[in-house]
Image (tube, rainbow, N blue to C red):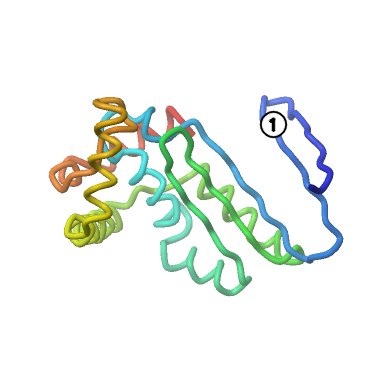
Amino acid sequence: LPGYDRFLESNGLTGILIPSDKQEVVRIEFFFRAGKIYEPSALVAHFTTTMLEKGTRKHSAEAISAILDFYSAHLELSAGYDYTNVGLVCLTQNLNKVLPLLLEMLREPSFDESELRISKEIFAQNLQINLEKNSFVAGQHIRKLIFGNHPYGTSPAVEYVESIESGILEKFFKETF
């Protein structure tokens, strides 16, 4: 395994730096205690995370996508059970162009209503498709048997999607991110 340096910023942020002189690529990841176990109601962590790339106060979803594409950067957003992960992969030479955008997404997401509506529709359609797959349904039942009513044992349902509102997401974002 490569060596690494751990550092602690004055604001309490802990960082780990893994240098490599073999590739001209940088990967930055932020982990937030904003996973499923922290959400006030079902799917809030998922949609809060999804909406980070759907616009900021200064950039639309299309503008964010265009900037990332232009600089060959890849954004990874994942809301897990315990943590939410926000990652960026780009060429080292382009970091100074895309890092400000990533920080803007983490500081000033817009939670745009029209983008949220589209995201909810896509999620509901994908969920309907997954609910027709035996492996998906079996996974839901196994987690329910093992974890019961704990957040690890609960599964998304279409009716939960309807209750998602931008105000709820914005509040969750401010409290956890």
Compared to 167, does 133 lie above or below? below
Quadrant assignment, res 43? top left
> Which residue is nearer to you in this view: 54 or 156?
156
Position of 94 with respect to 35 (left or right) is: right
> Which residue is nearer to you in this view: 114 or 163?
163
Which residue is located at x 75 percent, y 63 percent? 92
Position of 144 with respect to 5 (left or right) is: left
Q: Of the residues shown, which amino acid type is indicated by label 1?
A: Thr
Compared to 146, does 74 lie above or below? below
Q: Position of residue 35 (x, y in %)?
A: 42, 35
Which residue is located at x 23 percent, y 40 percent? 141
Position of 4 with respect to 145 (left or right) is: right
Packing grade of label 1 (10 A; few <14, some 14-19, many >=20) is few
Compared to 30, does 69 lie above or below? below
Question: Which residue in the protein does label 1 denote?
Answer: 14
Which residue is located at x 47 percent, y 67 percent? 63
Compared to 156, does 96 lie above or below? below
Q: Position of residue 45 (x, y in %)?
A: 36, 39
Q: Position of residue 165 (x, y in %)?
A: 23, 42
> Which residue is nearer to you in this view: 97 or 137?
137
Give the farthest residue toward the bottom: 70
Give the farthest residue toward the right: 21
Which residue is located at x 43 percent, y 41 percent? 80
Quadrant assignment, res 5? top right
Secondary structure at badge 1 equals strand
Quadrant assignment, res 163? top left
**Image mark count:** 1
Q: Position of residue 123 (x, y in %)?
A: 25, 56
